[in-house]
Image (cartoon, grey):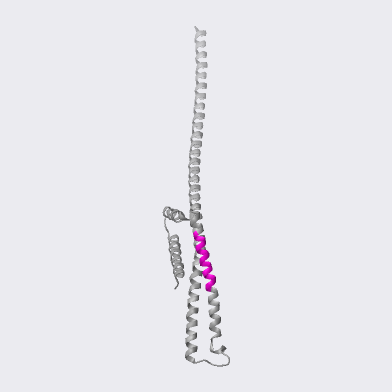
């Protein structure tokens, strides 16, 4: 395998490793650290340009491998005994030619699959990273909403308790006002009786 295809295979291994790390069920704090660590190099514009150039080169290799597969497949069909016209070459020569063409087609297909899977996994990895980041942000927002709801519920409970206590105090105050009114009436009644008794005693004297 040529050097550039070895580099493409190394890139595919790196993508698979990073995809595996993203897929593991880490806690939220660990996942946030992993995402921040992994996204730190991509914030540099030079790194982004280099990555685009690399995947552009992989795309060129993918298109070239497709053309090679097509040309080798056409050559294999053309070299088949059924398509030979006129003279028939020796059987051993036919077998050697077909085995060589089949080997070249195998290598071309291998290179095509290698470049295709690398490009496809790059798209999946980019989308997975964005989804995981959005999931973390959504979970943080949900936790904040739950915390606010719990605080509102506690405030509401405190308010209801205060209202109940205020109502009980009002009832107690009303009962004491009634008792005070009754005591005033009794005091007035006793005072009137005392005055009447006093006046009757004086009149008798």
Please tell me whether residue 40 belongs to the stretch shown in magenta: no
Name which residue lies at 51% across and 34% down: 167
| Residue in front for this viewpoint, 66 or 204 | 66
**Residue 174 in the image: x percent, y percent?**
52, 29
User: Number of numbered discs present?
Assistant: 0
Residue 121 lies, with reference to residue 108, above or below; the image says above
Query: What percent of the width, then of the height, locates residue 10?
Result: 43, 66
- Residue at the (50%, 43%) spot, across then down: 152
Of all residues, the one furthest to the top in this rendering is: 205
Is residue 52 highlighted in magenta?
A: yes
Residue 138 location (% of width, % of height): 51, 52
Q: Residue at x 49, y 60 (%)?
A: 51
Give the farthest residue toward the right: 85
Residue 135 visible in image: no
Q: Position of residue 96 (x, y in %)?
A: 47, 86
Dominant secondary structure (helix, strand or loop) of the stretch shown in magenta: helix
Q: Is residue 10 visible?
A: yes
Q: Is residue 185 above or below residue 68?
A: above
Which residue range is magenta in the image? 50-65
Of 30 and 102, which appears nearest the observer?
102
Q: Quadrant of residue 37?
A: bottom left
Tell me which residue sits at (54%, 87%) in the image: 80
Rendered-image quadrant of the N terminus: bottom left
């Amino acid at each position: 395998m040529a050097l550039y295809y070895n580099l493409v295979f190394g890139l595919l291994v790196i993508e698979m490793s990073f995809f595996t790390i993203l897929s593991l069920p880490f806690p939220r704090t660990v996942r946030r650290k992993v995402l921040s660590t992994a996204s730190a190099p991509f914030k540099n514009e030079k790194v982004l340009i280099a990555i685009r150039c690399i995947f552009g080169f992989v795309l060129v290799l993918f298109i070239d491998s497709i053309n090679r597969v097509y040309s080798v497949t056409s050559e294999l069909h053309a070299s088949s005994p059924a398509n030979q016209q006129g003279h028939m070459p020796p059987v051993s020569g036919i077998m050697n030619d077909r085995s060589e063409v089949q080997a070249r087609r195998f290598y071309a297909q291998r290179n095509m699959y290698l470049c295709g899977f690398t490009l496809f996994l790059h798209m999946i990895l980019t989308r997975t990273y964005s989804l995981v980041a959005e999931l973390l942000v959504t979970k943080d927002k949900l936790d904040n909403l739950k915390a606010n709801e719990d605080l509102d519920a506690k405030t509401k409970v405190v308010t209801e308790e205060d209202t109940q206590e205020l109502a009980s105090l009002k009832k107690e105050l009303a009962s004491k006002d009634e008792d005070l009114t009754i005591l005033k009436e009794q005091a007035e009644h006793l005072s009137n009786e005392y005055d009447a008794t006093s006046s009757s005693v004086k009149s008798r004297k």
